[in-house]
Amino acid sequence: MQHDHELYSAVDDNVDGIVVPDDHELKLKITYEYHDAPTSGHPGREKTYLLLTRDFYWSHQYKWVRKYVRACEVCQRVKPAPFSQAPLQSLPTPSECWQSISMDFVFGLPPDNKRRTGIVVFVGRFSKMVHLAAVPAEVTAKQTARLFVDMVFRHHGMPIDIVSDRDPRFTARFWQ
């Protein structure tokens, strides 16, 4: 449709969009506003395309946006690598009780009568049996090791492996 030299067209049955002529500079300016402008924030290929298609249409628009975003230095600099972290892998299931354990701390609990605000948790990964002990917020690696000996080693022997979140109290030189 054309009204007083304005060109627009129905892109689909429900949405009117501006049909952009095959003008490279015009497409660059429009795409800049939807991708690079401070109010846009480099939303990436898919989002830029969706934002543009709300208002504009031109031939091979998706391909244009893909090339534009690929050429954007900011996007390429801050885009996370496709596999920047190794994918998570499940741990093998132990075949015996207390052969493998997990250890962790929980802090921020209400204080008990000895002013301890945390617990150390030892879990047998095969049986899911749990041993818990109240600990102060400033529990040391040595105190944690003593609890391990008293609560796990004394009753179940030495596990083959220990799973932890690498808390300094588990990785301290004392344990090595």
Image (spheres, rainbow, N blue to C red):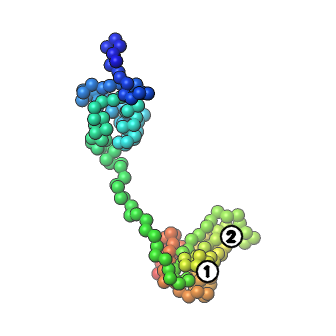
Please, what is the three-letter code of the amino acid marked with disc 2? Arg
Under circle 2, the secondary element is loop
Whole-percent x, y for residue 143 in the image: 60, 78
Residue 12, picture quadrant:
top left
Query: In front: mark 2 or mark 1?
Result: 1
| Of 73 and 53, the residue lying toward us | 53
At 35% across and 49% down in the image, what residue appears?
Answer: 79
Vertically, is 64 above or below 106? above
Q: Quadrant of the N terminus?
A: top left
| Of 24 and 96, the residue lying toward us | 96
Residue bearing the label numbered 1: 147
Vertically, is 146 above or below 28? below
Residue 18 visible within the image: yes
**165 left or right of 120 in image:** left
**94 left or right of 46 in image:** right
At 68% across and 70% down in the image, what residue appears?
Answer: 116
**154 left or right of 60 in image:** right
Q: CA distance from mark 2 to mark 1?
A: 15 Å
Residue 142 visible within the image: no
Label annotation for residue 58: none
How many numbered badges does the structure rendering display?
A: 2
Under circle 1, the secondary element is helix
Whole-percent x, y for residue 20 in the image: 30, 26
Residue 144, picture quadrant:
bottom right
Vertically, is 2 above or below 37? above
At 42% across and 34% down in the image, what residue appears?
Answer: 39
Neighbour tally class for label 2: few under 14, some 14-19, many 20 plus, Cα within 10 Å: some
At 35% across and 58% down in the image, what residue appears?
Answer: 83
Mark 2 and mark 1 lie on one chain; the one further toward the N terminus is 2
Vertically, is 42 above or below 18? below
Please, what is the three-letter code of the amino acid marked with disc 1? Leu
Residue bearing the label numbered 2: 116
